[in-house]
Image (cartoon, rainbow, N blue to C red):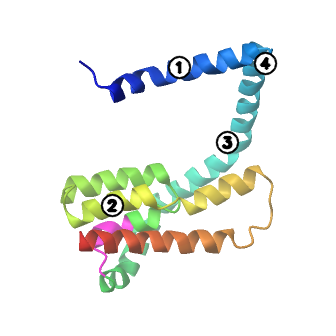
Amino acid sequence: MPDILSLLSIAFLPLLITIILVWGIWKKVPIYDAFIKGAKDGLKTSVEILPFLLGIFLAIGALTSSGAMGFLQETTRPFFEKIGIPQELISLILLRPVSGSGSLVLAQQIMEVTGPDSFAGRAASVMVGSCETVFYVLALYFGVTSVKKMRHAFLSGIAGYIAGVMASVYLCHIM
């Protein structure tokens, strides 16, 4: 017999859709027209976002295929080793602010090589779950909204990212 959480999980989306439809009928909203308008707005937003996404993905491709990522890894390795961050995490730390999906692939590779219960595997999991893709977010949000001055967003994002990396390494060391 399924438990109550399983039943809620299965019924959640149909119940939510039903509630939205009943509410729309009650408020006399033209539901289908509202859905079509929302879909059109969503497609417009997708088209507006596309150039910024392409720019980020091209930059990531150029960074990795040119060998610049390998150079950055080798250059920063002594610094990271001094502060207790293993070599396996360097590429993840360098790529995570730029690409969420790319960093997921790196985290998977780290866990396949070192194991998910290793220090590097645990730290990679925490970093992927708690550190933001700073450059991606800034390029996407500021590009779409046409905001020209980021003011303190970049520095705040990088400071938060560094704090997230350090916290994940520290917490995985003590646990």
86 part of magenta stretch: yes
Q: Residue at x 46, y 68 (%)?
A: 68
Amino acid carrying label 3: it is Leu
Cα distance, mark 3 to mark 4?
Answer: 35 Å
Query: Image check: 29 left or right of 118?
Result: right
Label 4 crowding class (10 Å Cα cut-off): few <14, some 14-19, many 20+?
A: few
4 or 2: tag closer to the N-terminus: 4
Q: Are marks 1 and 2 in contact (CB under 8 Å)?
A: no
Q: Disc 3 designates what residue?
A: 50
Q: Residue 124 at x, y = what percent?
A: 33, 61
Q: Secondary structure at mark 1?
A: helix
4 or 1: tag closer to the N-terminus: 1
Residue sitting nearer the eye, 96 or 25: 25
2 or 3: tag closer to the N-terminus: 3
Cα distance, mark 1 to mark 2?
Answer: 37 Å
Q: Residue 160 at x, y = what percent?
A: 53, 70
Q: Residue at x 56, y 51 (%)?
A: 57
- The quarter of the displayed image where residue 94 is located: bottom left
Cα distance, mark 4 to mark 2?
Answer: 48 Å
- Tell us which disc is closer to us: 1 or 2: 1
- The quarter of the displayed image where residue 19 is located: top right
Image disc number at residue 124: 2
84, above or below 10, in the image: below
Amino acid carrying label 1: it is Leu
Q: Main secondary structure of the magenta part?
A: helix
Image disc number at residue 27: 4
Label 3 crowding class (10 Å Cα cut-off): few <14, some 14-19, many 20+?
A: few
Q: Disc 1 designates what residue?
A: 15
3 or 4: tag closer to the N-terminus: 4
